[in-house]
Image: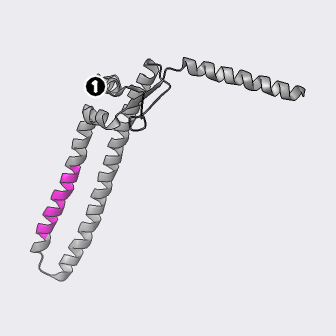
Amino acid sequence: MKKFKLAALLMTAGLFFTLGNQADAAGVGYINYQKVQEGFPFAQQAVKEVDAKALEMQQYMVDKEKQYKSLDTPLKKQNFEEQTAREFKLKEEAYMRLKVQKEEQIYNKIQAATKQVLVEQKLDAIVDYRVIFVGGVDVTDTVLQKLKSGQIK
């Protein structure tokens, strides 16, 4: 019986502790990641770099197609195709590495700015805006301002 009373007392104390912590909670913020990404100059520049690399690959294939048409024997065409396929694969891998690298840089900068806003506004969490149905604090513009101000490196 003593153990039961002790367990009940501990559970009651835990309940009051939990309710007390919830009363001090600042709330939940939410962010429109897409809007932040579109308004972030670094992200805009990164997208331009990735797009330029994609255009470079397209131009490479156009140039190779012109060269291919000028070849006169099947053997030359076959060798040309094999070499072009190898070269294109290397270009494609470089393109994918660049794209992933830029996406990670953008994400890390947005996440760092979001963490600063979380601390500054004393929020418990910041989630994607699509998760919130009702309530919460929109911190999208605050994060975007922080990114544009150059405070995040």
Residue 63 is one of the magenta-drawn residues: yes
Quadrant placement of the N terminus? top right
Q: Secondary structure at mark 1?
A: helix
Quadrant placement of the C terminus? top left
Q: Residues within 10 Å of mark 1 (few under 14, many from 20)?
A: some
Q: Which residues are magenta?
A: 53-67
Q: Residue at x 42, y 34 (%)?
A: 132
Task: Look at label 1 and name its amino acid.
Answer: Lys
Q: In this rendering, is residue 31 above or below 89?
A: above
- Horizontal and vertical percent position of residue 127: 44, 33
- Horizontal and vertical percent position of residue 10: 77, 24
Q: Residue at x 44, y 24 (%)?
A: 118
55 sits left or right of 97 in the view: left
Residue 83, picture quadrant: bottom left
Q: Is residue 55 visible?
A: yes
- Horizontal and vertical percent position of residue 6: 83, 24
Q: Residue at x 47, y 19 (%)?
A: 122
